[in-house]
Image (cartoon, rainbow, N blue to C red):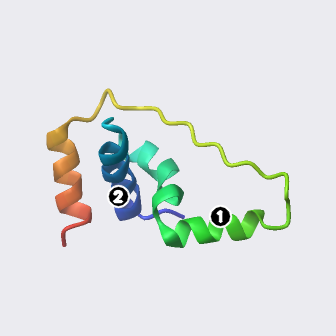
C-alpha cells in the first residue's frame, strides 16, 4: 500500500523527470518506480515468476497544476 506522501513523491519526481504533471492517483501507480520500499516489495512479489512484466499506465493531469503540486508537496513531503 502506497502512502499519500509516496504518491505525491511519485508526482513530483515524474514531473521532474518528464516535465509532465500528474495527479496523486497516478502518482500512486508511479510510486513503486521511485520508492525503494515499494519497489522492493513489488519485486519480491514477482521474484518467482521470471515472465513477470511491470507496466505503468500514466494518465491524469487535467486536474493538476503547479500550485496544486506545490501544495501537495508542502502538505505531504515537507513536514
Residue 10 rendering spot, x and y as whole percentages: 39, 53
Which quarter shows the C terminus? bottom left
The residue positioned farthest toward the front in the image shown: 17
Residue 38 rendering spot, x and y as whole percentages: 55, 67
Residue 47 rendering spot, x and y as whole percentages: 78, 67
Residue at (16%, 51%) from the top-left corner?
71
Based on the displayed image, in which of its 4 quarters is residue 26 positioned?
top left
Mark 2, residues whose alpha carbon is within 10 Å: few (<14), some, or many (≥20)?
many
Left or right of residue 78: residue 38: right
The local secondary structure at tag 1 comes to helix
State the separation of the CA atoms marked 1 and 2: 17 Å
Count up the numbered dots.
2
Based on the displayed image, in which of its 4 quarters is residue 61 positioned?
top left
Left or right of residue 56: residue 14: left
Left or right of residue 14: residue 51: right
Residue 65, disc: none
Residue closest to the eye, 43 or 63: 43
Which quarter shows the N terminus? bottom right
The local secondary structure at tag 2 comes to helix
Residue under pointer 2: 9
From this view, report whether residue 25 is shown above or below residue 73: above
From this view, report whether residue 43 is shown above or below residue 31: below
Mark 1, residues whose alpha carbon is within 10 Å: few (<14), some, or many (≥20)?
some
Residue under pointer 1: 42
**Mark earlier in primary sequence (1, 2):** 2
Residue at (65%, 64%) from the top-left corner?
42
Amino acid at each position: 500500500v502506497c502512502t499519500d506522501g509516496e504518491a505525491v513523491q511519485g508526482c513530483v519526481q515524474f514531473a521532474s523527470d518528464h516535465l509532465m504533471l500528474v495527479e496523486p492517483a497516478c502518482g500512486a501507480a508511479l510510486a513503486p518506480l521511485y520508492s525503494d520500499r515499494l519497489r522492493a516489495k513489488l519485486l519480491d512479489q514477482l521474484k518467482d515468476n521470471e515472465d513477470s512484466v511491470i507496466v505503468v499506465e500514466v494518465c491524469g493531469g487535467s486536474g493538476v497544476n503547479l500550485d496544486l503540486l506545490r501544495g501537495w508537496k508542502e502538505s505531504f513531503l515537507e513536514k
